[in-house]
Image (tube, rainbow, N blue to C red):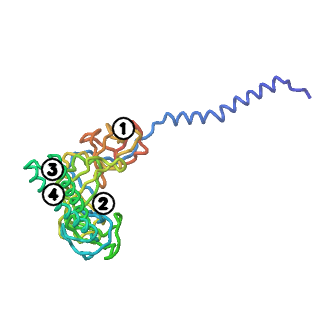
Amino acid sequence: MKKIPNWIIIVVVIALVVASKFIFFAPKEDAAAAAKAKPKGPVAVNYYVVKATAFSNDVFSTGKIGALNQIDILPEVGGKVTAIYFKEGETVNKGSVLVKLNDADLQAQLLKSKTQIALSEQKLERLRKLISINGISKEELDIQENELNSLKADQAYILAQLAKTTIVAPFTGVIGLKNISEGSFVSLNTPIVSLVQTKPLYVEFSVPEKYSNLFNKGIAVKFSNDHMKEAQTATIYAIEPRVDELTKTIKARATYNGSEHFYPGSFVKVFANLGETQNALMIPTQCVIPTLKGQKVFISKNGIATEVMVTIGVRTDDKIQIIDGINAGDTVITTGLLSIKKESPLKLLKSVN
């Protein structure tokens, strides 16, 4: 049998390789090219037509009840308790004597001081008579007058110490539970009893800083707790002049002088109406997309998606205020936001309210 030349075998192999390329790869390339050339259809979305509306600036917050005045009464001097003049839980008036401490040693010092002052005054009177006839020098008279003034200063100090042994109520309020008994010894750090002013009270709460231009003194707020049948009213009397760096809120206090009983320190729910905003541009909350640079929305212009950066304002339950970035009449996209890119064709389906 005649042997086939090598060059013929090589030519056949090359021919087979070239043929396989057209058979196996050409259709795929054509399909990819066709898919690339085929235009994508529009994204079906719902939309919201922006319109200017009025809305009420209602703020809900949590707060606490506080007393305008409340203290733990501590003695100014140490000593033994000789008398207690209050009953736990009763109301006492400002200036009422609450506790008396032992003052026997101070009373003895006061008696001694009075005797010394009396003798010094008599001596001074004799010297004044002598100086009138030049019986003594002016210097001796001055020394005696200084001695008398020094004794009077010592007496004033003793009287001040005596006053500290009588503990009185600094304001009208309700006495708490006592921590002492008659005969016990108290030091400067011994809490005797608490005193709380129960009327009027205040409600302390905070609102987000975005309401700062609407937050003013004199605004009435409502507050309640789980045990109240109806909300009570308080009036804002003081506002913190700075924003809390951690919570970005502004703190305020409102005075309550009603008949409902509250314990200072208890928590309440607070509602405040900060007025009504006219011609506000409100859109559904889901329209706003957070980004690294802020917030954005997609609007439809002639059936094409347009990306717009916006500045947001206050929120309600389902809508958010847009301060800058869109205008009344714009068509804002509400659904399909993950499928939309800049300049994507859109198919508007249904308008949402």
What kind of residue is marked 3?
Answer: Leu
**How many residues crowd around disc 4 within 10 Å: few (fewer than 14), some, or many (20 or more)?**
some
The residue wearing badge 3 is: 141
- Tell me, yes or no, if residue 35 can be seen here: yes
Residue labelled with disc 1: 307
Nearer to the camera, 66 or 10: 66
- x%, y% of residue 249? 31, 50
Q: Where is residue 347 in the image (x, y as percent from the top left)?
A: 36, 43
Labels 3 and 2: the sequence-earlier one: 2
Residue type at the position of mark 4: Lys
Residue 282 position within the rendered picture, expressed as x and y whole percent measured from the top left: 26, 47
Q: Which residue is drawn at 34% across and 74% down?
A: 184
Q: Nearer the viewer, residue 260 or 45?
A: 260
The residue carrying mark 4 is 123
Of marks 4 and 1, the one in the foreground? 4
Residue in the foreground of this view, choosing between 138 and 23: 138
Tell me the mark number nearer the camera, choosing from 2 and 1.
Answer: 2
How dense is the environment of label 2, judged by Cα within 10 Å: few (below 14), some, or many (20 and up)?
Answer: some
In the displayed structure image, the side of residue 345 where residue 207 appears, left or right: left
Q: Mark 3: few, some, or many residues within 10 Å (few <14, many ≥20)?
A: some
Q: Is mark 2 on a helix, strand or loop?
A: strand
Give how far across and how far down residue 212 sits, in percent. Answer: 25, 47
Type of residue at label 1? Answer: Glu
Residue under the image location 60 percent in, 35 percent down: 27
Query: Are the two marked residues, 4 and 3, in contact with CB atoms closer than 8 angstroms?
Result: no
Of the numbered discs 4 and 1, the one sitting upstream in the chain is 4
How many badges with numbers are in the image?
A: 4
User: Which amino acid, mark 2?
Assistant: Thr
Q: Mark 2 points at which residue?
A: 62
Residue occupying the point 37% across, 46% down: 45
